[in-house]
Image (tube, rainbow, N blue to C red):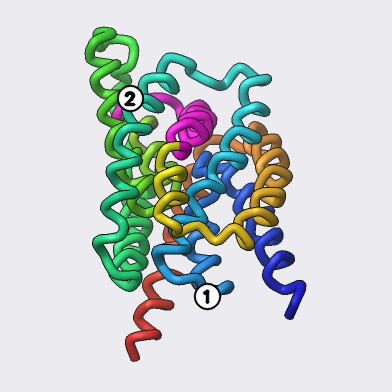
Amino acid sequence: MHFFLPTASFLIGLLAGFAGGIFGIGGAALTLPLFHVVLGLGGNVAIATALPLTIPTALSGAWTYLRHGLLKKRTILVCAIAGSLFSILGALFTGMFSSLALMLATGFLFVFLAFAIRSQKPLPKIEKVCTLREKVARTAGIGAISGFISGFFGIGGGPILVPLLAYARQIPLKKAIPCSLAIIGIYAIPGSIAHYFLGNIDLAVFVPAAFGTIIGAQIGARMSIGIKEARMKRLFSLLLFLLGATLIINELLHLL
């Protein structure tokens, strides 16, 4: 049992980094339920420990995408600035809710997004016809929404960022995913700092998991480049559904 916690943490980080590199979700959407269900961390601690793990995952994966020219730098900058400010606000709100409420809310959020992404039909292309001011306003709004959710739910905001970048900004999924990773890597920082000073991060879990996420993100990002967009969409929605269902079922079982 002495080696269980660091070994399990590393493997969870490796898996989360791999998934994060492929889907642009920072990996916390996976580490959060696994920390809670497998390692038994409380809801607030699981959220706080999962959030800073998005930083090495995101930056590691984004570096691979950068070398392939898939990052939209101005979109990343605007989203990251807005998200950084609102992630602090989200982190401060976390302590106002119980572990059960946070985990159930996260689970239902994932399931909702899974169906929304799966059923969403392509919208008319608007990126080239809207003005620069409209693009900036829309991008800042996306950053603010996903930033708050990042700090509050500890999921990095990727499950929100990718759909919003793809549909509200009409950025192709193959570019929305890399942009999401880069944005997450920036705006998860202030939310993580807030959680650290609140004393919610479990460092014994975080450190080995961080090493795993760096390795996994490199592998996932390289694989993602070769996956077709339609298949990526199906896989992404399936991942969110499974994560959401796992959280909901786990919490409901504890109520019985």
Comparing 152 with 34, the one in front is: 152
Q: Which residues are magenta?
A: 166-189
For the question of whether residue 239 can be seen, the reply is no
Residue 180 among magenta residues: yes
Q: Secondary structure at mark 2?
A: loop
Left or right of 135? Residue 51 is right
Give the percent coordinates (x, y) of residue 77.
42, 19
- At mark 1, the secondary structure is loop
| Residue in the picture at 59% in, 58% down | 203
- Mark 1 Cα shell of 10 Å, populated few (<14), some (14-19), many (≥20): few
The image shows residue 9 at horizontal and vertical percentages of 66, 62
- Mark 1 sits on what residue? 40
Residue 83, how many percent across, how many down?
A: 35, 33
What amino acid is found at the position of numbered circle 1 in the picture?
Answer: Gly
Name the residue beneath numbered marker 2.
169
234 horizontally vs 108: left or right: right
In primary-sequence order, the first of circles 2 and 1 is 1
Queried whether the magenta region covers residue 1, the answer comes back as no
Q: Residue at x 53, y 21 (%)?
A: 71
The correct choice, above or below, for 213 with respect to 6 in the image is above
In this rendering, is residue 10 above or below 252?
Answer: above
